[in-house]
Amino acid sequence: MDAKRATFPKSERLAWKRHIDRLFAEGKSFVSFPLRVVYLPVKTESVAAAISVLVSVPKKKLRHAVDRNFVKRRIRESYRLRKQAVFRSFAGRDEMLLLAFLYLDAQKDAFAVIDAAMEKALATLQTTLHLQD
């Protein structure tokens, strides 16, 4: 990944049903309100991306699709801006990280709130997985 450009390409998005099912069946989680983070390191031979990410906002919490999409955009943007440290420390391994961010709040939060939660979540993830920068 280029240090100058913070991008979130399609190759880093978690889309395979097999991986998603495995993530929620075997993965561990923690809460950094308003985000719940589910993660699972997976051994793999060929890695398209070191980290694959899924963002979900439940319909039960935010009824309107416009609001759900708005919150998902904010979560993706916050992840995109803050992923470098985790990405650099995980890129040299022979495994990939499956990662899901689930939104827990029943209202649309400001970007500052989501960004602070993302910063805390990624720091917790690094300490949990014993990643060095």
Image (spheres, rainbow, N blue to C red):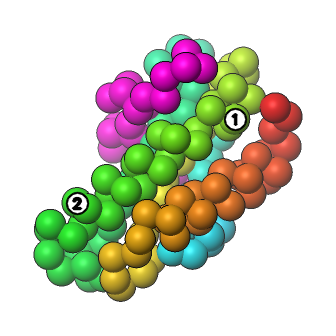
Instruction: Please say whether residue 22 is visible from this viewpoint.
Output: no
Disc 2, SS = helix
At label 2, which amino acid type do we have?
Asn
Magenta-drawn stretch contains 6: yes
Determine contact: label 1, label 2, CB under 8 Å: no
Mark 1 crowdedness (10 Å alpha carbons): few <14, some 14-19, many ≥20: some
Q: Nearer the viewer, residue 87 or 4?
A: 4
Is 45 on the left-hand or right-hand side of 120?
Answer: left
Residue stretch in magenta: 1-28
Write the residue at 59% across / 65% down: 117
The N terminus appears in which quarter of the rendering? top right
Please tell me which of labels 1 and 2 falls first in the chain: 2
x%, y% of residue 70? 25, 62
> Is any part of residue 49 visible from this angle?
yes
- What residue is drawn where x is 55% and y is 33%? 51
Q: Which residue is mark 2?
A: 69
Q: For residue 76, which numbered disc appears in the image?
A: none
Asked whether, in this view, residue 133 is left or right of residue 63, the answer is right
Residue 72 position within the rendered picture, expressed as x and y whole percent measured from the top left: 32, 58
Q: Position of residue 47 (x, y in %)?
A: 53, 19
Q: Quickly name the residue at label 1.
A: 85
Note whether 123 is above or below 117 in the view shown.
above
Res 62 → quadrant: bottom left
